[in-house]
Amino acid sequence: MRRASHDSSGCIIVLLVLLFLHLSLAAAAPQQKVKTLTPVFVEQAPRIDGVLDDPVWQGAASVDDAFITYNPTDGEVLPQDTKVWLAYDHDNIYFAFYCYDTQPDKIKTSITKRDSIFNDDWIGVAVDPLGSKQCLYELFVNPSGMQGDLYNTPASGENSAPDWVWYSGGKIVKDGYTIEIKLPLKSIRFKHGENVSMNILFWRRISRLGMSGAWPQVDPGKGTINSTTKAVYGKLRKQLLLEFIPSLTYGSIRDLDTPGNWCAADDNTAVGFSAKYGITSAVTAEVAVNPDFNQVESDAFQIQRNRRYPIFYSEKRPFFMEAGDIFALSGSHENMWTVVHTRKIVDPLWGARLTGDAGKFTFGVLAAADRWPGRAIEDEENFYLGENAYYGIGRVKYGLKGDNYIGMLYTGKKLGDFSNRAFAFDTTLRFGKAHSIRANFIGTSTDDPETGESYKGNAFAGRYVYSTKKFVGYLDLENYGKNFRMDTAFYSRTGVSSIQVFLIPIFAVKSGWLKAVRPVAAARYLYDHTTSLEDRYLNFGVVFEFIKQGMLTIGWDVMDDESWEGTTYDTGGFWGNGSVQLTKWLSINFFVNRANHIYYDGVDPFLGKLFSFSVGSTFQPLRTLSFRFNYQYTDFDRKSSGEDVYDYHIFYSRTTFQPNKHLFFRALIQYDSDLDQVMSDILASYEFVPGTVFHIGYGSLHEKLAWDAPAGLWRDDAAVKRFYQTSQSFFLKISYRLQF
């Protein structure tokens, strides 16, 4: 099954040359009257209900100018007008928006949980409260007043994990919709004093057109953080931030012992506590005891059959989610997903964090103790029984011009006599009008008494980006040594070097329905230093972008050579995906893949033919009610003989009912024919603000099994089986945010 080696270096050279040969000329963009903004000080705070009848909003708008598109194409005038007002008092900053729309009956909105609004119409504001261009607090509101918030940094881009306390209201009116936002100064790091300058940018999304625009215009070569304008606040007072969040979590799970008989429930009650203190307006200290899972969203389902690499699960615990991006490194992230993956702190006893800004410096320190490595393991000896693992992480960045910076990171894990440490340096550097470099270098050292080994390793990851309105291209270089080990990180492989190139010209289309065409050429070469084998990849594709948030992607892997267990396999094929918001109440999406694929077996791997297809839809008959359905079919055959190796069907449904912005009900059902399992999960949740929550949930697992009475055990290999409910769980969480 070994394939003759291809000389892909010529392909990569051609792609690099093409990076500088795209000569499409951008049309002159409409001009905006960008200016420094002067928010109005108010003695009487506006009522945040989405109705712009407060006296402060009766004056001239702070922004009454065209919004210029950045998606799906750059440089057009967003075809609906928008006005923005800014105000503040001693404790809050305020924003008001009038989003005009000549077809208000086509405005898409919903009453939904936080960060689930991005397929709706929405308005947004990005705030850099320190004026350092090293972070943005991004706040989004749909016409029903529902919220989404992201944290944006030069190292890692946008992250939806942090949730801040802020308030919003929205209302659809006869000629559009209106929005109000109140952002407490206690929720952000800022400078206090007189004539405080913050950087500001506004967005607007029109769902049915699939178009997004901004004021000031977002320049692709500069990025969002550098495209902001200034807002000068006359005087901001220092805020006393003192916050406590006690929590109580109860969980119970029990399994079916024999048909009709359940084993005793495994109950667990945990009391948690977190505290936050603002040392200054820009420096915050936090501590948590028994930081728990948020429990609102269980881990997203992921296919576990025939996987080469471990599954990545995102962080769910509020303490670790907040301000996590400060520990991210700039660079390429093809192999290294994240250098600080806090889910590796499995069962934390306590955690402490200090974050802040001082002049051009941004810093963060995180420490935690993890009980998980010292647990008792059934039928297995634990070398570290009774020991806690201790983690220490430190980060500092120095801001240069714009969002450029240089930074350092330290991570360490200590478990008994075991230790793993990493020191990293990284930078983001923009130059010219369209160029940027992002890079990091990491050195690691490990002492392992269990194996008696001590070793050092290193890694480098860098990305060069060229970005304009008409062309995007990037070049990645990565090298991970054989002895590289970083216990806080999530990465795929060690002992490899790789180069990767992407070239994406962008063609705007003047059509009523087609908006842009993006041809894509991608090439990758990887060398495995352990086996001396090579991976080669060359793909050509095209992306079509339409109105109604429509997207269609078609790709062809012209060459895809992947090495596994000493053999190189040809895994090329075709794939495609698409999505569209057909109406306000119905969206659909699909994915299809037909390709050669490796059966990852350490003893007897082989090449197979994979066919995978999925289709999904979201049906929203009411603002408060939505249904999500998804079906996936996968078939894998041995290529040499056509023998069926496996095939499975997966059905997934999610029903969500949210009568208001605080109360939320959800039911999940999933059937997996490969595992012969049906899983269900029911949740009721009330969240007043992040931190003040009440969750109650019930989950069950049904498995298709047979009961072998003589042997006294369950069998999944019997000829006749039926579904039994084999597990059920219940959980309850209560927490309350006290802020002074």
Image: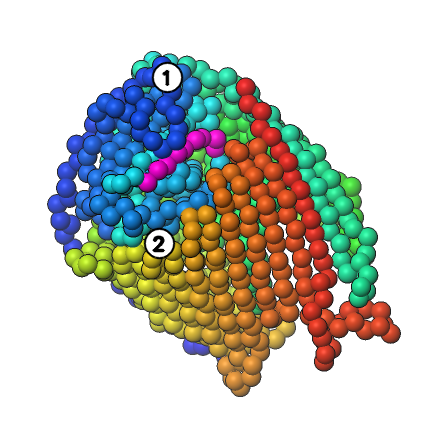
Does 584 appear in magenta?
no
Q: Is 382 positioned to the left or the right of 332 in the image?
A: right
Residue position marked by numbered label 2 in the rendering: 584
Q: Above or below — where is 696 with respect to 646?
A: above
- Measured as percent of width and height from the top left, residue 487 is found at 60, 45
Secondary structure character of the magenta stretch overall: strand
**Residue 479 in view, yes or no:** no
Residue position marked by numbered label 1 in the rendering: 44
- Residue lying at 64% horizontally and 48% vertically, measured from the top left: 697
Q: Above or below — where is 195 with respect to 172?
A: above
Q: How is the image coloured?
A: rainbow
Q: Quadrant of the C terminus?
A: top right
Q: Which residue lies furthest to the front in this view?
A: 174
Q: Classify mark 2: residues with Cα within 10 Å, few (<14), some (14-19) or many (20+).
A: many
- Measured as percent of width and height from the top left, residue 469 is found at 22, 49
Residue 296: image quadrant is top right
Q: Which amino acid does label 2 sit on?
A: Lys
Residue 144: image quadrant is top left
Residue 97 vs residue 578, the one in the foreground? 97
- Residue lying at 48% horizontally and 77% vertically, measured from the top left: 609
Residue 675: image quadrant is bottom right
Q: Which amino acid does label 1 sit on?
A: Gln
Q: Above or below — where is 719 with respect to 365?
A: below
Q: Which residue lies furthest to the left in this view?
A: 28
